[in-house]
Amino acid sequence: MNMKYRKILAVTTAMMIMLSGCGAAQAAAGSSDASAQTTSVTYDAASKSEMFTERDLSGEYDEAAALKISLNGTSAEVTEEGTETKASAVTIDGSTISITAEGTYIFSGTLDDGMIVVEADDAAKVQIVLDGASVTSKTSAALYVKSADKVFVTTAEGTKNTLANGGTFTAIDDSNIDGAVFAKDDITFNGSGSLTVTSPAGHGIVGKDDVKIAGGTLGITAAKHGVQANDSARFAEAEVNISAGTDGVHVSDSADAEEGTASDSYFYIADATVKIDAGDDGIHADAQALIEGGSITVSESYEGIEALEIEISGGDIDVTASDDGLNAAGGNTTTTQSSSTSDTAQTGSASDTAQTTAAQGGTFGDDDWAGGKGGFPGGGGFSDGGTDGKIEISGGNTHITAGGDGVDANGSVTISGGTTIVEGPTSGDTSVIDFNGTGTITGGTFIGTGGAGMAESFSSAENQGLIAVSVGSQSAGQKVTLADADGNVIAEQTPELDYAVVYISTSDLQQGGTYTLTAGSYSETIELTDSIYSTISGGMGGGMMGGHGGMQNGDQGGMTGGPQNGSQESGMSGGPQGGMQGGPGAGQNSGDAAI
């Protein structure tokens, strides 16, 4: 990974028992004074010109200079020596073609059970041009980059190409090959043709350094991750369709995890079109997900986009998730999380090692709770989720349909531009927006609908107003409309899920104005005397549970929602009614059924 995108990793020790007026609380389960080591990772502003070289994006090659190789079912032969790439750079052993020197190599034809192996010196740049080529390895990778400085896989214009594994991976060395394409060094996919990657027993594309997809049409079907990269996965000027049994795109450095250091693995997209159907996360990156443009559609996932820091500055994002839509969490501290499929360690492969980035603190998945929602009987209290997670939306169009929280950060949420639409469920302990630091909106348009039980609002609104209102039970398809005093509609949305709360913030919503909110059968005229108007009660504004599965061992301590409902005398200590004073919202004073 280019070091210019890495800055100082600042490691600080922070007390994790603070609860803001509107935010969620995080603390180590069973401890009222636990501390956690948290890590902040920041990057320079990214841009496509910094993320990709000209050669990455061009997809060009000199046919006259290239060596041509014909694939003939069970064998291969060199059919034409190039002016710059010589036949001596290729060794053919049965159905295995080994490339040992820098150059351009054009492949055509079909290899039924064989592989292309790149084993060049560390300074070599190797370009593999697929010109109507189909390579299947029944027991290994169709393309194995064992050593090189960088490999370009270029699809020739107008051609269809395939790289596939047959359903079994048998070790041929100590690399633990588990992808239809397996690269131990940087690899770039470009060109203007199409490539299908199929891996019925493993990952689609595995890159131990950077994986760049920078041209052409790429279809990936994999039993595990569609694209797995150690350092980065970067997308530009390509159309990519991924169907994966686990994560669609997974960026995580196992070496960082083993060393207990903060990961700087990241995902980046500029102007590509990426469509993902995933059994687990749509996109996971340990450190950062940078979305500057293009189009991302996650049609099915457990969590849609997950990273310690998610930054959306452009593009069109449409995420459907059975749990959280956007999740900024602080890494995994254990190899297996008991209550989230997204946190379960993958077995049988080193590249599937669960992430154990201890320095980042906290856990991914399950809404950042250990053993269930903190405070419920048997729930085990709060997990050590950390506070260094960050979601920043400054542009683009983002639409989230979530079965859990719509926008969830173990840290801060900041919206300063773009259009963000969130639709969440009415059942369960979910919220349209969930954070345990600050939630700030300073620009753009935000419309959210979802459940009322655990709902919380932004902690501040600047430059424009925010309305967060409980509207009773409304059915899917019942339009939400906000109009100004003159009857002009300034915001509207037709939720596709049932809803009980509505959030609206837009630049047309200003303090001092009068507005009419209509949501199905509900209607209210609102005078915005402050920057935020909220009738949302309950949620995470309350205190910590002191009883069953909570932060302390009191018999009946509970999470309290009102401004003065927490135990003033006991604070966070245990006891019959021990609790932490809560923020705004309705709650109960004590007892087992405090939530």
Image: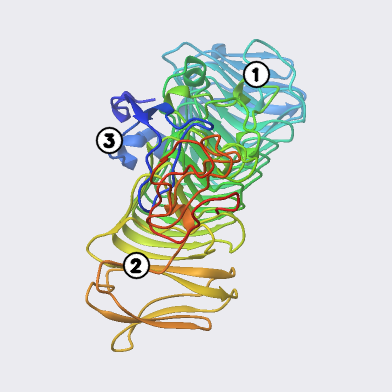
Which residue in the structure is indicated by mark 3?
44
Dot 1 alpha-carbon crowd within 10 angstroms: few under 14, some 14 to 19, many 20 or more:
many
The residue furthest bottom is 486
Quarter placement of the C terminus: bottom right
| Left or right: residue 389 compared with residue 132 | left
Q: Which mark is residue 97?
A: 1
Question: Is residue 559 shown above or below 175?
Answer: below
Of the residues under marks 2 and 3, which one precedes in the sequence? 3
Instruction: Check disc 1 and give the amino acid type.
Output: Ile
Count all numbered tags in the image, as a single digit: 3
Percent coordinates x, y for residue 153 in the rendering: 52, 32
Instruction: Check disc 2 and give the amino acid type.
Output: Ser
Residue at image point 49% right, 68% down: 501
Instruction: Check disc 3 and give the amino acid type.
Output: Asp
Quadrant of the image occupied by residue 328? top left
Percent coordinates x, y for residue 264 in the rendering: 40, 28
Closest to the observer, 334 or 77: 334
Q: How is the image coloured?
A: rainbow
Percent coordinates x, y for residue 50 in the rendering: 31, 36
* Residue 442 at least partly seen: yes
